[in-house]
Image (cartoon, grey):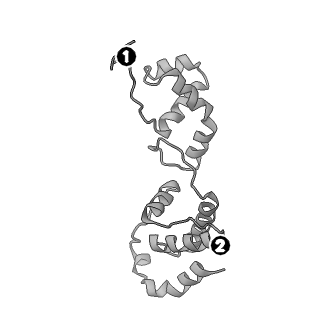
Amino acid sequence: MHVTSCSIRKRQPISLDEKKAIIEEARAKSIPEVAVHFNRKYPESTIRTILKDKEKILKAVEEGAESKRARIRAAKHSDLDEALLCWFKDVRSQNIPVDTHTLKAKAVKLARMLDIGDFNSSEGWASRFKSRYGIVFKQVQGKAGDVGMEAISDRHQTVLYKE
């Protein structure tokens, strides 16, 4: 049997926004009706898979995952991610600026405390961590931006290395 190239569908990523829309449509419609609603862009089997994973998808959307993202991946060391995110929120609530270098240094320290031997705080890891949690480092403007790093250096070091 020979399969023509017209009958083979290429795998296409579906964003979290689109998956959420499919889940919302499926609340009131059957799977074939949902497929028709989306102009049969997605096969019924794909819609079934999305509905099977709807709890994970809705949780990711609720937690603020990037809406254009197609895949939901858990961090390799979720306990480290949780601890670092908690530290980050605490430090930022005190208006202490945090940069990528500081974030990576704290991650290494927490990894040692959690006995994670295979952790590497690379630029790629830091970028993915910031992307997972919607963290963006921006230049502070106005009077708050006039404060030099030396003015907060002692406090910053205390928070970074506090046991």
> Which of the image's four quarters has the N terminus?
top left
Q: Is residue 70 left or right of residue 23?
A: left
In percent of width and height, residue 108 lies at 55, 72
Q: Above or below — where is 84 with respect to 10?
A: below
Nearer to the camera, 148 or 71: 71
In percent of width and height, residue 92 lies at 55, 70
Element class at badge 2: helix
Task: Using the rendered view, name the quadrant where residue 159 is placed.
Answer: bottom right
> Which of the image's four quarters has the C terminus?
bottom right
Question: What number of labels is visible?
Answer: 2
In percent of width and height, residue 58 lies at 59, 40
Q: Which residue is mark 1?
A: 3
The three-letter code of the residue at mark 1 reads Val
Q: How would you rate the neighbour count of disc 2 (Cα within 10 Å): few for under 14, some for 14-19, many for 20 or more?
A: few
In percent of width and height, residue 71 lies at 50, 42
Nearer to the camera, 35 or 125: 125
Residue occupying the far left of the picture: 5
Task: Using the rendered view, name the quadrant where residue 51 is placed.
Answer: top right
Query: Which of the marked residues, 1 or 2, is nearer the chain's N terminus?
Result: 1
Q: Above or below — where is 140 with respect to 130?
A: below
The three-letter code of the residue at mark 2 reads Met
* C-alpha span from label 1 to label 2: 56 Å
Residue at 50% across, 40% down: 16
Q: How would you rate the neighbour count of disc 1 (Cα within 10 Å): few for under 14, some for 14-19, many for 20 or more?
A: few
Residue at 42% across, 84% down: 148
Q: Which residue is mark 2?
A: 113
Element class at badge 1: loop
Residue at 49% across, 74% down: 102
Q: Is residue 120 left or right of residue 7?
A: right
